[in-house]
Image (cartoon, rainbow, N blue to C red):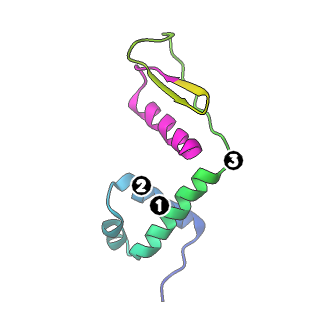
């Protein structure tokens, strides 16, 4: 009989999967999970992120107003300017939040 995982245990496994860069089958096998169960968890987790009504903001401080290398994202009448000098981890955080809100 398989153990039933708590919500926090599932979230821990999902976060580890996201960080691992592995495919479902490989991660499931290495962690003693059923690949169909893992796939279902991932679908539900991403669906939960997309349907949340909570909006998160990341403050970015910059000294330059704008440069030719800045990134501009326009969607639904809103424009977001991402400074070119932004650190990689900051850009990843912004894109993760945007993906959960708009895509």
* Disc number placed over residue 82 in the picture, else none: none
Residue 31 quadrant: bottom left
Q: 35 and 8: which one is in front? A: 35
Residue 3 x/y as whole percent: 51, 81
Q: Magenta residues, as a range?
A: 81-103
Q: Position of residue 43 (x, y in %)?
A: 50, 63
Indicate the quadrant where residue 89 lies.
Answer: top left
From the image, tell me which residue sits under label 2. 18
78 up-or-down from 66: above or below: below
Write down the residue under mark 1.
Answer: 14
Answer whether labels 1 and 3 touch (C-beta < 8 Å). no
Magenta-drawn stretch contains 89: yes
Pick whichever of labels 2 and 3 is earlier in the sequence. Answer: 2
At 69% from the left and 47% from the top, the residue drawn is 53
Q: Position of residue 40 (x, y in %)?
A: 49, 69
Name the spot of residue 18 as percent of width and height, x first.
41, 54
Nearest to the observer: residue 61 or residue 50: 50
Q: CA distance from mark 2 to mark 3?
A: 22 Å
Mark 1 or 3, nearer chain start: 1
Residue matched to label 3: 53
Total count of labels: 3
Q: Secondary structure at mark 3?
A: loop
Do the CB atoms of the residues marked 2 and 1 lie less than 8 Å apart?
yes
Q: Residues within 10 Å of mark 2 (few under 14, many from 20)?
A: some
Q: Residue at horizontal 39%, vertical 52%?
A: 19
Residue 22 image-quadrant placement: bottom left
Is 38 contained in the magenta span?
Answer: no
Relative to residue 99, is residue 6 depicted above or below?
below
Q: Main secondary structure of the magenta part?
A: helix
Instruction: Give the Cα separation between the discs numbered 1 and 3.
Output: 21 Å
Query: What secondary structure is found at the residue carrying circle 1?
Result: helix
């Amino acid at each position: 009989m398989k153990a039933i995982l708590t919500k926090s245990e599932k979230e821990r496994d999902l976060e580890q999967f996201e960080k691992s860069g592995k495919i479902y089958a490989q991660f499931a096998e290495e962690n003693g999970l059923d690949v169909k169960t893992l796939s279902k968890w991932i679908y539900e987790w991403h669906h939960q992120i997309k349907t949340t009504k909570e909006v998160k903001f990341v403050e970015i401080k910059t000294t330059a107003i704008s440069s030719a290398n800045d990134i501009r994202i326009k969607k639904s009448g809103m424009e977001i300017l991402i400074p070119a000098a932004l650190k990689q981890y900051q850009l990843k955080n912004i894109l993760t939040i945007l993906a959960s809100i708009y895509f």
